[in-house]
Amino acid sequence: MSRANHVLTLSCINRPGIVSAVSTYLFETGCNINQAHQFDDTETGRFFMRVVFDRVASEPSHTALEDGFQTIANRFGMDWRMSDPAARRRVMILVSKFDHCLADLLYRWRIEELPMDIAAIVANHPRDTYAHHDFDGIPFHYLPVTRDTKLEQEHALWELVQSTESDVVVLARYMQVLSEGLAAKLAGRCINIHHSFLPGFKGAKPYHQAHARGVKVIGATAHYVTGDLDEGPIIAQDVERVTHADFPEDLIRKGRDIERRVLARALSYHLEDRVILNGRKTVVFDT
Amino acid sequence: MSRANHVLTLSCINRPGIVSAVSTYLFETGCNINQAHQFDDTETGRFFMRVVFDRVASEPSHTALEDGFQTIANRFGMDWRMSDPAARRRVMILVSKFDHCLADLLYRWRIEELPMDIAAIVANHPRDTYAHHDFDGIPFHYLPVTRDTKLEQEHALWELVQSTESDVVVLARYMQVLSEGLAAKLAGRCINIHHSFLPGFKGAKPYHQAHARGVKVIGATAHYVTGDLDEGPIIAQDVERVTHADFPEDLIRKGRDIERRVLARALSYHLEDRVILNGRKTVVFDT
Amino acid sequence: MSRANHVLTLSCINRPGIVSAVSTYLFETGCNINQAHQFDDTETGRFFMRVVFDRVASEPSHTALEDGFQTIANRFGMDWRMSDPAARRRVMILVSKFDHCLADLLYRWRIEELPMDIAAIVANHPRDTYAHHDFDGIPFHYLPVTRDTKLEQEHALWELVQSTESDVVVLARYMQVLSEGLAAKLAGRCINIHHSFLPGFKGAKPYHQAHARGVKVIGATAHYVTGDLDEGPIIAQDVERVTHADFPEDLIRKGRDIERRVLARALSYHLEDRVILNGRKTVVFDT
Amino acid sequence: MSRANHVLTLSCINRPGIVSAVSTYLFETGCNINQAHQFDDTETGRFFMRVVFDRVASEPSHTALEDGFQTIANRFGMDWRMSDPAARRRVMILVSKFDHCLADLLYRWRIEELPMDIAAIVANHPRDTYAHHDFDGIPFHYLPVTRDTKLEQEHALWELVQSTESDVVVLARYMQVLSEGLAAKLAGRCINIHHSFLPGFKGAKPYHQAHARGVKVIGATAHYVTGDLDEGPIIAQDVERVTHADFPEDLIRKGRDIERRVLARALSYHLEDRVILNGRKTVVFDT
């Protein structure tokens, strides 16, 4: 993967000529296609494309490239985005008491595995809950929440998203359900990790439910947040085998490992523009 | 695995002295323990044990060994079973239109991977549905079923189980729900394979449901049949990754592979006395 | 997957304009791109592309479409292939004593999971070794081989490949090493399944080697056959966990399952034109 | 898992009466068996046993329990160990430039997932290489090493093992080969993580080797260190799928995830006395 490349993602109603128009435009503006995926959802008639390209010269500028592409986008009625390798995404991480996902994301950020800037860490527990973590200058915000203060807290949250210019919000085991209003504002850019295997066990204590049912496999699901909790478009899932000898506490332990790797995978897909929304589902160009 | 060995499985309320009593009995009757597993379900206080042993001499006979053990079993209130390596289990296979599990079980039986005799193959489709299969002398029974004839058909089924002296009944994608009455008669010895990942998608067309939800993982569950369809104790589960490019027909294709290997694994566990019922769950000593 | 589609695969030295030229050609000849993948091997500078498309009208004919594409292929120096959905590939299966892969391929062929015609089954054991299989009219050829008759036997094999017009040769646990000469004639269209995890354990009795080493994972590798045995370009691999309690016979049993599914997967990739050779490696567009 | 339990592990030549003797001893000393596994290696005739038990009363003391068991151990010629739940193992972690395994182990230790005390962290890079880690009072030792100073450095290392009373040494990507002398001193209590899938790719840059070979699966192996580098008894292995689109840097990234989870799993098995040496192999009672 040439990480310094531009990535163009788009979706539109399928009809002949899309790939030709896109690739000819890139060719004529001095761009070279390195990797590309297309997918035609024959059920809905919708077409999805991801193109990774680099530029032979520094001209035209990224902005000019985008402006020129708008004509093609208009012709086909595209939803699209062209990432600028010079601009890293700004990510806000929301966390609650359990910090295994936070610890994992911080580590991957520090060694530059995840190409992002962390705009802020927001928690409903005070800073000393995370005393052992070196936040390394990342602003920390303590926003406690109760049933009564939920609306205000969400208001403060949304203010923070705006003031920190966060592009992405990650619920890293945040344990709070976002209101439909906030979920709507963050549509397509707020990622949650759901413990246990969705949609198998909803509600409280899913690992206890899974244990009571005697399952032999548990898992985790990372998805975009929508107003309908735990029902947003799935980005990534993974599982692990368990046995009768695994008590709920063991499932929780194994779950931590699955959760952190599934959340990191989903965030990495998002940051690399590998995910395109397709109604209630996603198209993930992951190879 | 010394396949010609005896296997003793037992469960009872846990209390001190069980392992000692069992192992001392085996020692004193000239048996040698090759493999053993114990598990104490601290939630329920129930104790589970599987012992694989061989006998130095041909005396005492298997029957005498069982008779002698009954005293210990009584003392601890055990549910138990001691398998005789000389007696292979008799298995009845029920099948409907889709024959991938049947084909797989037949092959594994033929190469002696599954240590069983197939007592009968029963289908609700006529023999020529399975024209390409060499049943090799296994009796085939065509028992069609409609909503109106269900009771009679189940009666015939039960007669067959008895007349063929079947120990185990395998629903190899049989696609019919057994009545509560028949399920009860076959409790703990009737294995079903459930397509798609239980308990995620219940009801009709689970692969279509999974596709509509955009899942990234599908699976299959093998379980003992109870009156509550698809809710019996789980024996084995497995999964496979899928992508947005997998249409329902692809999920069905991938599902076939998962289904046949999970059902074969569950049956093999059952035949090797690796599964012990634990209420709504199982204890599976699989290594 | 619209299985009735055309598939165009190509590779060439990467340079600007390839995707544009290809997609414009398809657009202008009335074709509609459904799925496409591109990959640029930045190490070698080679570019790989797979395009799935259908045609709005029956004109131009498949042959005319190919003829027209040759001009573009020449301009970029492409290795390419355009599959005609009306023409199924003809596959010859070579088998030895162990028939688990044969049984699996036959089943998948019968239920139309693998889109191929089986041109012939060739074995170095007589027909009655496979007595339980219904070959359903597929010609069977018994070609025994000894060290002394190897050359003649390979000559007969090659005659058969030609007379049956086989496009693909599958070594379904054939257990014979092809001579360099025959391997060269079948370059890029002869698939072998290698038991055990390559390149870990070469030589005889790999499962016994794996057992002696105490590995916790075993696997299988499907690859194109080259003169250098077991070193051809890898198409697919998979693994399964094993434990200390698995004796070599257990590894062999588990290996059968991995072998058959990895071979079937590799063959399916090949038949769907998902594999493009890249020197000693492959590019596999599997989603 | 009742984590506060005692664990008895033993191995000896198999002969009748072992299980009976062990379980009767535990019964008569007021102990209650919660979990147990036995395994008979029929190839070598060696018998392996792991028993988890708790005590009804505080008498006899752990030491008295051990002393009493010595008689039985002598009778059967056992290698054995009886862990005292009151005594946590002391672990020394050795690390080099790459700190992903260190970060992972520290996190699991902090949340009490790994039941150990960290006696020391030893590195051949200075403390500021790990500036972002909160060592939380764990003594850090900087022991640089060159080809010329290797013997002295190993001497210092061994002194540290003794002075810190370390029971276990973990090479958390330490990247140095221990001398045969030091490996011998740490036999059975020094765990290494080997990047890439052993024994496939030995020597330098294994991920580059794997990439050049075009493998579709990579993995990692955790094993006890012996004089023969990378050939010690395997404790745990795991793998992940890779594709043609994964360049060596991607394999390294994916490798980090596999390495850290395999090393953590192996260490956890060791700390819970689930691993018993069996010549060049291990018996791992992992369920």
Image (cartoon, coloured by chain):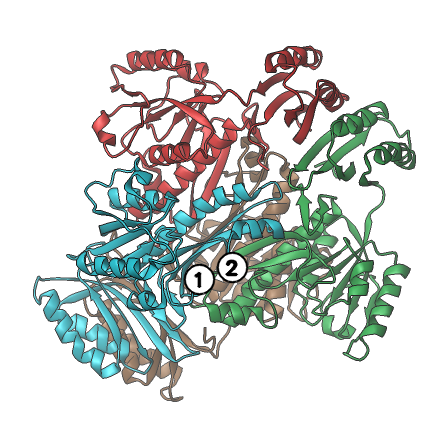
Chain colours: A green, B cyan, C red, D brown
Would residue B276 be found to the left or right of residue D216 on screen? left
The residue where tag 1 is placed is: B230
Quadrant of the image containing the N terminus of chain D = bottom left
Q: Of callouts 1 and 2, which one flags the residue occurring earlier in the amino acid sequence?
A: 2
Between C58 and A228, the one lying in front of the other is C58
CA distance separating discs 1 and 2: 8 Å
Between D50 and D194, the one lying in front of the other is D50
Residue drawn at the location 57% of the way across and 52% of the way down: B210
Residue B287 shows up from this direction: no
Task: Give the numbered dot on residue C282.
Answer: none
Which kind of residue does numbered mark 2 sit on? Answer: Lys
Helix, strand or loop at label 1? It is loop
Label pair 1/2, CB-CB below 8 angstroms: yes
Marks counted in the figure total 2
With respect to residue D85, does A173 lie above or below? above
Mark 1 neighbour density, 10 Å: few (under 14) some (14–19) many (20 or more)? many
Q: Residue furthest left?
A: B59
Would residue C248 be found to the left or right of residue C240 on screen? left
Residue drawn at the location 53% of the way across and 41% of the way down: B250
